[in-house]
Image: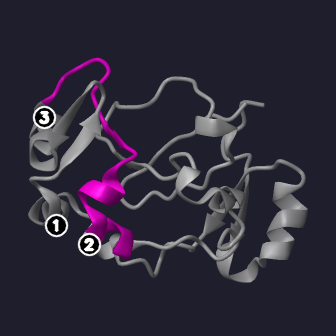
Amino acid sequence: WLARESIASVDASSLTAEDFVRDYEKRSLPVLLRGCAKAWPAMKTWSKEQLVARFGDAPFTCGPCDLPLREFYAYADRNLDDTPLFVFDRLFHERAPGLLEDYEVPDVFRGRDLFDLLGEGRPAFRWLLIANKRSGSKWHIDPNKTCAWNAVVRGRKRWLLL
């Protein structure tokens, strides 16, 4: 069970929503969808320099506090903390709404979010994470016990799924 890269990986352009539901969702199997973010503007514009130029003064939640994005990056570039702070912000869509224009929900998930039925009463459902080397979250269950989709725009992220 400790095998590396033991999760299925499929080309997102060849996977229909029906195939995804049958092969992965109904079976509660994680899957890596290759290529679903390649056309996003974020893939070209979410560098540290461009994000600071666009949203440097916007506050983002970093651990126990909110920091302007430029201050977070200044901290991240020079920190030697054992457990570095990282941006984990559920209000980014209000604080930096331009970020919403830079990505879209992948086709296999679009129009299938039952929380949409709650309208204004829906719980938080999107977060922006920005991290540097050695940062990471503790063991957790995703908020509201949801099944999430994640996209890595720069760098890499490791998951350990149990």
The residue beneath circle 2 is 45
- Give coordinates of residue 5: x percent, y percent: 67, 47
**What amino acid type should be assigned to the residue bearing mark 3?**
Tyr
Callout 2 touching callout 1 (CB < 8 Å): yes
Q: Residue at x 80, y 67 (%)?
A: 20
Callout 2 touching callout 3 (CB < 8 Å): no
Q: Secondary structure under badge 2?
A: helix
Q: Where is residue 10, by image quadrant?
A: bottom right
The residue beneath circle 1 is 50
The one of 11 and 100 positioned closer to us in this rendering = 100
Q: Residue at x 63, y 62 (%)?
A: 116
Vertical order, 108 against 52 (above or below): below
Q: Secondary structure under badge 1?
A: helix
User: Which disc, if any, is residue 160?
Assistant: none
Where does the magenta region start and end? Answer: 79-101
- Give coordinates of residue 37: x percent, y percent: 50, 72
Quadrant for the N terminus, please: top right
- Callout 2: few (<14), some (14-19), or many (20+) C-alpha neighbours within 10 Å? some
The one of 3 and 161 positioned closer to us in this rendering = 161
Q: Residue at x 18, y 23 (%)?
A: 80
Distance from disc 2 to disc 1, alpha carbons, whole Å, reads 6 Å
- Give coordinates of residue 33: x percent, y percent: 65, 65
Tally of numbered tags: 3
The residue beneath circle 3 is 75
